[in-house]
C-alpha cells in the first residue's frame, strides 16, 4: 500500500486523539469486499508497519496485505474536514 505523507499525518493525528499508548497503532481492516476501516490495535507478527516522523501510524496485517498492495491511502478535503480515502493504484 502506498500511503501519502498527508495520509500519514492524518493517521498520526487520529491516533493521538484516541490514545497516548505508543504500543497502540491504527490497523487497516477489511470490513466488506471493498470497504476498509481503521481500528486501534497492537502490532502482531507479520504486520507491515507504516511510520511517520518516527512514530508507528498504521498496521497492515497479512490478511489484507495482498488487497492493500494495489491501493493508495490518501487525503481528500471534505466539508467536515480532511478525510482519508482509499484509491486504486
Image (cartoon, rainbow, N blue to C red):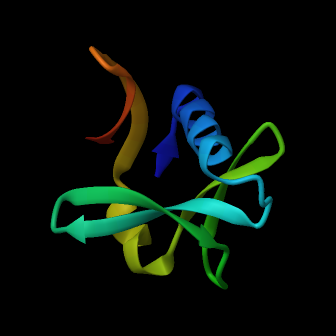
Compared to residue 53, the image places residue 60 above or below, namely below
Q: Position of residue 61 (x, y in %)?
A: 50, 74
The residue positioned 66% from the left and 74% from the top of the image is 42
Looking at the rendering, which quadrant does residue 87 occupy? top left
The residue positioned 49% from the left and 44% from the top of the image is 2
- The quadrant of the picture occupied by the C terminus is top left
Q: Residue furthest right?
A: 54
Q: Is residue 61 left or right of residue 34?
A: right
Q: Is residue 64 left or right of residue 50?
A: left
Looking at the rendering, which quadrant does residue 68 occupy? bottom left
Compared to residue 41, the image places residue 10 above or below, namely above
Q: Residue furthest left?
A: 33
Q: Position of residue 63 (x, y in %)?
A: 41, 80
The residue positioned 61% from the left and 67% from the top of the image is 48
The residue positioned 42% from the left and 41% from the top of the image is 73
Q: Position of residue 44 (x, y in %)?
A: 64, 81
Q: Position of residue 16 (x, y in %)?
A: 68, 43
Looking at the rendering, which quadrant does residue 46 occupy? bottom right
Q: Is residue 26 left or right of residue 32?
A: right
The mark total stands at: 0
Amino acid at each position: 500500500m502506498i500511503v501519502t505523507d498527508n495520509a500519514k499525518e492524518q493517521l498520526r493525528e487520529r491516533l493521538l486523539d484516541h490514545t497516548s499508548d505508543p504500543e497502540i497503532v491504527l490497523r487497516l481492516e477489511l470490513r466488506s469486499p471493498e470497504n476498509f476501516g481503521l481500528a486501534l490495535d497492537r502490532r502482531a507478527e507479520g504486520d507491515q508497519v507504516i511510520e511517520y516522523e518516527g512514530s508507528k501510524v498504521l498496521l497492515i496485517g497479512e490478511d489484507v496485505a495482498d488487497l492493500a498492495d494495489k491501493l493508495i491511502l490518501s487525503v481528500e478535503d471534505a466539508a467536515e474536514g480532511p478525510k482519508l480515502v482509499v484509491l486504486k493504484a
